[in-house]
Image (cartoon, helix red, strand yellow):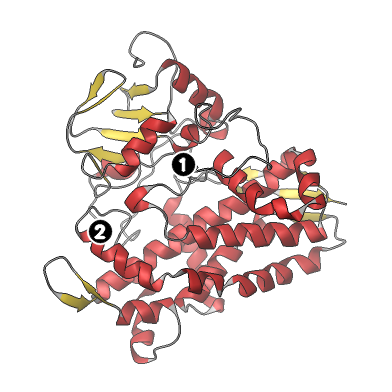
């Protein structure tokens, strides 16, 4: 069943009221219009877990090369080589394999002590202050510090990079996002790359400059300057935004569910599963758009080639067919495959780092602030419909 004239369920990705709490709408979509068509913005949406999973793993029928958001697909913007998130096989396969060799689990685990040190530096001065802002005091800064450390960007420059990264994702309330021209060209990082060419170091930027890969044409080569800049840009924006949002949702959900927070205080071994539950329950990205390359069928109806299709990750993550009592937040829920990091060839390369940042941040927060209450009157959501989360999230601590 599609929406058509059968019912009045409505999903508008730019509606601020729906955006603030999309889950009642998602539930109705799953029940009434699992294949939904929005005539105003000309897109289809899928809300069942199985359907979303099917799209994410079918690289032949659903392309990411025209963008991963509705706005990007509709804008007709093109993406330079190295954008990775916006590439299809075979070029994506070769580039991802190359990047996975430098974005290794060993390198990620080596950052754990730095993540903890940064959390301590941020949180210790706030003990006894009676207030703590999950975003201002931690979430808005820690992810960029870690990405900056990985890439080799000086700490004194990271705040400016963070401000720029945030600006690329901002949108006006109720309006489609207008992708800025400098979102993927990476020129903001040009000076750092030129410095690293002359002064190699033990960082990801140097690895990218020196890595060799098979480019799909039987040619083995290094990345071009433009490709390196694009890679760095994608890593900086993606790694900064989504992980910062995760910190905010940790604060909000555990503030709203003090019983769940007390479970973690009493049994810290539950913290990794709690982070997974936060990721499932409140994914920063509600959808992962795809361009349909050939006619496909869902719910007995055809989605024609050339359509924009939104697999709703936020809905799939609460689908009761996959997650019993999916609208309940439960830190003891057994860890299963949620779709927050995607699936298949576009599974997030930074997932291990995001999980580590979330886990360590929560450990250090609970040691210092076992109790808190969100100051809802002064909390503000971020002005973007690309990644959903908080700009400020102050809490009153005991």
Res 244 label: none
Of residues 15 and 319, the one nearer the viewer is: 319
Of residues 185 and 279, the one nearer the viewer is: 279
The residue where tag 1 is placed is 385
Q: On the image, which quarter does residue 36 sit in? A: top left
Whether residue 205 sits left or right of residue 239 in the image: it is left
Q: On the image, which quarter does residue 229 sit in? A: bottom left
- Image position of 37 with respect to 379: above or below: above
Whether residue 310 sits left or right of residue 246 in the image: it is left
Where residue 94 appears, x then y in whole percent? 24, 64
Residue shown at the point (57%, 73%) measured from the top left: 111
- Image position of 12 with respect to 78: above or below: above
Quarter of the picture holding the N terminus: top left
Q: Which residue of the protein is positioned furthest toward the bottom in this rendering?
A: 198
The residue where tag 2 is placed is 92
Of residues 82 and 31, the one nearer the viewer is: 31
Whether residue 396 sits left or right of residue 2 in the image: it is right
Q: Callout 1 environment at 10 Å: few (<14), some (14 to 19), or many (20+)?
A: many
Separation of disc 1 and disc 2 at Cα? 26 Å
Where residue 47 appears, x then y in whole percent? 42, 28
Q: On the image, which quarter does residue 5 sit in? A: top left
- Which structural element holds mark 1? loop
- Which structural element holds mark 2? helix
Residue shown at the point (21%, 54%) measured from the top left: 89
Residue shown at the point (66%, 36%) measured from the top left: 329
């Amino acid at each position: 069943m599609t929406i058509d004239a059968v019912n009045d369920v409505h999903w508008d990705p730019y509606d601020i009221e729906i955006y603030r709490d999309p889950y009642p709408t998602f539930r109705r979509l799953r029940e009434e219009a699992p294949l939904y068509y929005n005539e105003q913005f000309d897109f289809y949406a899928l809300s069942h877990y199985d359907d979303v999973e099917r799209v994410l793993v079918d690289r032949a029928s659903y392309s990411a090369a025209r963008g991963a958001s509705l706005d990007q697909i509709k804008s007709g913007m093109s993406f330079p080589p190295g954008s990775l998130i916006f590439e299809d096989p075979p070029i994506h396969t070769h580039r991802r394999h190359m990047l996975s060799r430098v974005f290794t689990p060993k390198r990620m685990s080596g950052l754990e002590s730095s993540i903890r040190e940064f959390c301590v530096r941020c949180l210790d001065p706030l003990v006894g202050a009676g207030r703590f802002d999950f975003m201002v005091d931690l979430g808005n800064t820690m992810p960029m510090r870690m990405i900056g450390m990985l890439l080799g960007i000086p700490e004194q420059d990271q705040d400016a990079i963070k401000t720029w990264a945030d600006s690329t994702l901002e949108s006006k309330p109720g309006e489609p996002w207008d992708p800025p021209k400098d979102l993927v060209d990476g020129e903001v990082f040009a000076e750092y790359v030129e410095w690293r060419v002359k002064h190699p170091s033990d960082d990801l930027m140097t690895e990218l400059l020196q890595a060799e890969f098979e480019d799909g044409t039987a040619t083995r080569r290094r990345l071009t300057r433009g490709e390196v800049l694009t890679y760095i840009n994608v890593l900086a924006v993606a790694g900064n935004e989504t992980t910062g949002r995760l910190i905010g949702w940790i604060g909000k959900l555990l503030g709203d569910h003090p019983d769940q927070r007390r479970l973690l205080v009493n049994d810290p071994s539950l913290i990794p599963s709690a982070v997974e539950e936060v990721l499932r329950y409140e994914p920063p990205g509600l959808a992962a758009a795809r361009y349909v390359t050939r006619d496909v069928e869902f719910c007995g109806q055809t989605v024609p080639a050339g359509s924009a299709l939104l697999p709703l990750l936020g809905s799939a993550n609460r689908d009761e067919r996959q997650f019993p009592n999916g609208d309940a937040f439960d830190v003891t829920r057994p860890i299963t495959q949620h779709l927050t990091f995607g699936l298949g060839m576009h599974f997030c390369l930074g997932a291990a780092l995001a999980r580590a940042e979330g886990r360590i941040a929560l450990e250090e927060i609970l040691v210092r602030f076992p109790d808190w209450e969100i100051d809802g009157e002064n909390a503000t959501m971020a002005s973007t419909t690309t990644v959903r989360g908080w700009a400020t999230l102050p809490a009153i601590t005991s």
